[in-house]
Amino acid sequence: MIIRIESKLDKKTHRYFLEIYYPADTEAPFITSVPRYETPAAAEQDVLAILAATASTAGS
């Protein structure tokens, strides 16, 4: 499974949100988060933490 994750700036709130694309080469996002992140790095760290937590509980 290959996904593409992009952080985007919401011009209305001046916060970042995430778009997750699956499959990676599709044009429309599969999931879009709410604009709650102050920086693109914060958004990307959050999605990595979510994926890591999900992966660690999937084997249980």
Image (cartoon, helix red, strand yellow):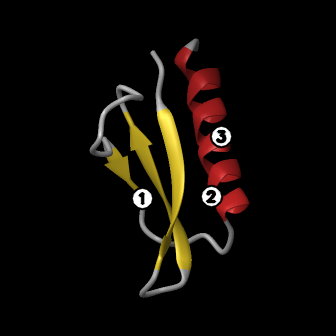
Q: CA distance from mark 1 to mark 2?
A: 10 Å
- Residue at coordinates 59% horizontally, 41% vertically from top-left? 50
The C terminus - image quarter: top right
* Residue 43 marker: 2
Element carrying mark 2: helix
Q: Position of residue 26 (x, y in %)?
A: 31, 33
The N terminus - image quarter: top left
Residue annotated with mark 1: 33
Q: CA distance from mark 3 to mark 1?
A: 14 Å
Give residue 56's quadrant in the image.
top right
Element carrying mark 3: helix
Residue 8 versus residue 32: which sits nearer the camera? 8
Q: Position of residue 48 (x, y in %)?
A: 65, 40
Q: Do callouts 3 and 1 mark residues in contact (Cβ within 8 Å)?
A: no
Vertical order, 19 against 36 (above or below) = above
| Crowd tier of the residue under label 3, counting other residues whose Cα lies within 10 Å: few below 14, some 14–19, many 20 or above | few
